Image (spheres, rainbow, N blue to C red):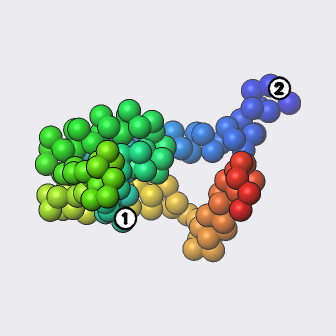
Amino acid sequence: MNTSDRVTDLVGYQLKRAQQALRTAMDEGLRAQGLTTPQYAALTHLEADEPLSGAELARRCFVTAQTMNAILVGLERARLVERAPHANHGRVIEARLTKRGRAKVQGAHATVFGIEERMLCGITAGGRRILNETLRRLVKNLSTSEE
């Protein structure tokens, strides 16, 4: 077995290829919605659990606080989110979806769900459950925190 075959047989390599293919498909699909993948991620987290600070959104979206600030500025300019100081912690700025932002993210879900369905084509419901459990186990195994 040559070195190239050994690399492509690594689970981590295949995970990265899958992640890259998913990101490319999402970038292409969301572009038609007028969104980027990071913007969609931020809107989705706000939809599920608003209001959120920029720092919390950054953690949930796997980007730096500075990057999330730039994402939020763009979303605010597009009138998809609004930001205001936290009621008890004035230095913390929280983001919330606007009505327009809620409609935008709900419309984008169909695109993303379609991409995920395409990605999982040919995998049974049981196989999908096992895949999800396996991915959660991988994260847990590499987690630095004790749970």
How would you rate the neighbour count of disc 2 (Cα within 10 Å): few for under 14, some for 14-19, many for 20 or more?
few
According to the picture, the residue beneath numbered tag 2 turns out to be 2
According to the picture, the residue beneath numbered tag 1 turns out to be 49
Q: Residue 67 falls in which quadrant of the image?
A: top left
Front residue (pair 37, 29): 37
Question: Tag 1, which secondary structure?
Answer: loop
Q: Residue 27 falls in which quadrant of the image?
A: top left
Q: Residue furthest top?
A: 3
Front residue (pair 80, 112): 80
- Residue at 30%, 34% (x, y): give it: 70
Q: Residue 43 falls in which quadrant of the image?
A: bottom left
Residue 51 spot, x, y in % from top left: 31, 60
- Tell me if residue 31 can be seen: no
Q: What amino acid is at disc 1?
A: Asp
Residue 144 spot, x, y in % from top left: 71, 48
- Residue at 72%, 44% (x, y): give it: 11
- Residue at 74%, 57% (x, y): give it: 146
Q: Is residue 83 above or below residue 50?
A: above
